[in-house]
Amino acid sequence: MDDEINEKISLYCVFCKSTSFVVPSDDYQPQPGEMLTCGNCGRENDYDSLMRLAKERALQIAEEKMSKMLKDALKGTGFKIR
Ligand SMILES: [Zn+2]
């Protein structure tokens, strides 16, 4: 997968959008069904919702990238996308 997309789909708190979570170690990988405590607001996020949001975000970024690439590719050809 694209590095830029990977970077942007990091999990974030559904309440305050913080990307810091209370984890036991730096290489900790949350498992489906787990609750993750936000490091900023302290509320609990369930992993499944976080992953769903992250995927939606990834799709959105991919679409934005595609339309930008398309616009760049069409630059100077006389075609215009509105
Ligand atoms: Zn939070």
Image (spheres, grey):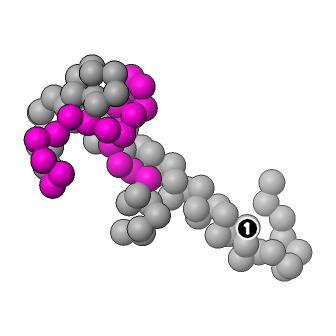
- Asked whether, in this view, residue 17 is left or right of residue 77, the answer is left
Query: In the image, what residue type sits under mark 1?
Result: Lys
Q: Which residues are magenta?
A: 8-27
Q: Is residue 49 above or below residue 68?
A: above
Residue at x 27% of width, y 20% of height? 43
Question: In this orientation, does residue 57 appear?
Answer: yes
- Asked whether, in this view, residue 37 is left or right of residue 12, the answer is left
Picture quadrant of residue 68: bottom right
Residue extending furthest right? 78
Q: Return the x and y of residue 35 as percentages of the image width and height.
A: 16, 29
Residue at x 11% of width, y 41% of height? 24
Q: Is residue 8 above or below residue 39?
A: below
Q: Is residue 58 above or below residue 39?
A: below
Q: Return the x and y of residue 55 as percentages of the image width and height.
A: 36, 47
Residue at x 13% of width, y 47% of height? 25
Question: In this orientation, does residue 45 appear?
Answer: no
Q: Which residue is mark 1?
A: 71
Picture quadrant of residue 36: top left
Instruction: Characterize the magenta stretch by its predominant secondary structure.
Output: loop
Q: Secondary structure at mark 1?
A: helix
Residue at x 42% of width, y 43% of height? 56
Picture quadrant of residue 21: top left
- Asked whether, in this view, residue 16 is left or right of residue 49, the answer is right
